[in-house]
Amino acid sequence: MSGAVSRPWAWRAYRGLMGRFLLIAGAVLVALFLLGPIIGLITSLLKWVLILGLIALAVAAVVKLTRDHV
């Protein structure tokens, strides 16, 4: 006899583990696909907030300089 022992439970456990691994990998992939546009939107909004803040500071500085000379 060859001494090989059939272990059907091991194959089922392996299939369950691989299924779980593929499910987690797929969820991570979908999360990354969704996270990209969200991060892009946040950085775009931050850019416009900074631009508008710089414009507001420039206007405030001009108003302050012009009022001092009157």
Image (tube, helix red, strand yellow):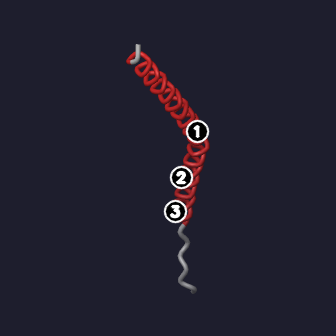
Mark 3 or mark 2, whichever is nearer to me: 2
Tell me the residue that label 1 is attached to: 40
Mark 1 or mark 3, whichever is nearer to me: 1
Question: What is the residue that sits farthest to the top in this orientation?
Answer: 70
Q: Residue at x 55, y 39 (%)?
A: 39
19 with respect to 58 (left or right): right
Q: Please state the horizontal and vertical placement of residue 56, each as a whole percent of the image.
A: 48, 23
State the residue in front, 38 or 5: 38
Question: What is the residue that sits farthest to the front in this orientation?
Answer: 69
Compare marks 1 and 3 and give the one earlier in the sequence: 3
Tell me the residue that label 2 is attached to: 20
Q: Please state the horizontal and vertical placement of residue 57, each as a whole percent of the image.
A: 45, 26
Give amino acid for label 2: Arg
State the residue in front, 22 or 14: 22
Question: What is the residue that sits farthest to the left in this orientation?
Answer: 68
Whole-Å distance between the Cαs marked 3 and 2?
16 Å
State the residue in front, 38 or 4: 38
